[in-house]
Structure formats: structure tokens, C-alpha cells
Amino acid sequence: KHGSFQATMGRELGSVLKLQTLDLHVGQRSAANIFVLADVLKSNTTVIKLNLCDNDIDDAGAANLADALKFNKTLTGLDLGDNDIRNAGAEGLADALKFNRTLTVLNFSENSIGDAGAANLTDALKSNKTLTELNLDNNGIGDEGVKSLADALKSNKTLTELNLGNNRISKEG
């Protein structure tokens, strides 16, 4: 029964995704529904902004979205704030940023990626040439994570806004 619902949802999303902005915040999306949405995003040609904040998206959901980002050619803004994404999810999304050439704004605030997740994003920032805004507010990032990010900024010439507020960064960071 769930498979039928998901297939229907996928068809419906595919037909209504003529929109440019899709706001699904505070939706409590299930992992299966995030998988369907991610699958639709792979071939979507109209949505440019997607808000998925406060949806309890975990590392598995982030991995599905990351896979979609590798193929999506239109999404410019993605809001994943206030979810349950940790280092593994950040790793998948960082890998996607190495391939994605359209995303310019990523809100990753209020997750729990920590220093390891920040280090994963560092590798992506060194090669990504489209991201201009990255919000990492309230992610448990400490001195090591911010040092990694600072290293990436030496070679990244496109990122113009980086929010690291409400993390565990000391004066040494």
C-alpha cells in the first residue's frame, strides 16, 4: 500500500513541479517520501528553490537528496535547516556539491554536522564554483571545523556569505 502511495506521489509531484519555489517546511516527511521527492528532483527542470527545513530529515534522507543534487540542473536554493543531519549526511551533500553546478544558496543551519561534517564540506568548497551562500549556524562546529573551512576559503572565490554563528568556536578558531 505504501509503495502505491509513493508511486502516485511521485507522478503527482512530477506533474505539478512546474513551480519555481516548493516550500515543504515543517512537513514531517517520512524517509520514503524524501526518497520519492529526491527521485523527482533528479529530472526536474522548473523548481529553483526548495525549502525542506524542520522535516526530521536524517542522514539517509540527506543521502537521497545528495544523489538528486548530482543530477539536478535547475535548483539554485536549498533549505535543509533544522533537521537531523549529521556528519554522514553532510558527507553525502558535500560529495554532491562537487558535481552540482547550479546550487548557489544552501541553508544547513541547526543540524549536527560537527567538525567532521565541516571538514567534509571543506573538500567540496575547494572545487565548487557556484555556491555563494552557506549557512552553518548552530551545527556543533568547533575550532577544528572552522580551521578546515578557512582553509577551503583560500581557494574558493565564489562563496561570499558564510554563517558560522552559534557554534563552539573559540578565539583560537
Image (cartoon, rainbow, N blue to C red):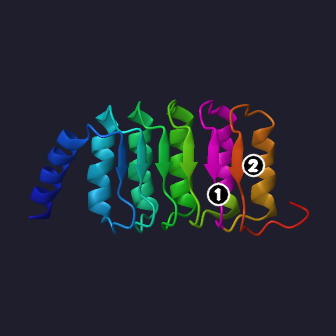
Question: Number of callouts in the render?
Answer: 2
Establish if 159 lies above or below 12.
above
| Quarter that holds the N terminus | bottom left
Residue 139's x, y, as percent? 64, 65
Q: Is residue 143 left or right of residue 28?
A: right
Look at the image and say whether residue 130 sits in the magenta stretch: yes
- Of helix, strand and loop, which one carries label 2? helix
Quarter of the image for residue 112 reads bottom right
Establish if 1 lies above or below 153.
below
Type of amino acid at the residue the image marks with label 1 = Leu
Residue 150's x, y, as percent? 80, 47
Look at the image and say whether residue 78 sits in the magenta stretch: no
Magenta residues, start to end:
118-139
Q: Is residue 119 left or right of residue 9?
A: right
For the residues bearing labels 1 and 2, Cβ distance under 8 angstroms: yes
Residue at 75 percent of width and 57 percent of height: 145
Label 2 sits on residue = 149
Going from N to C along the chain, the mark reached first, 1 or 2, is 1
Q: Using the rendered image of the protein, determine whether residue 143 is visible from the camera's viewpoint.
A: yes
Q: Is residue 5 left or right of residue 29?
A: left
Label 1 sits on residue = 136
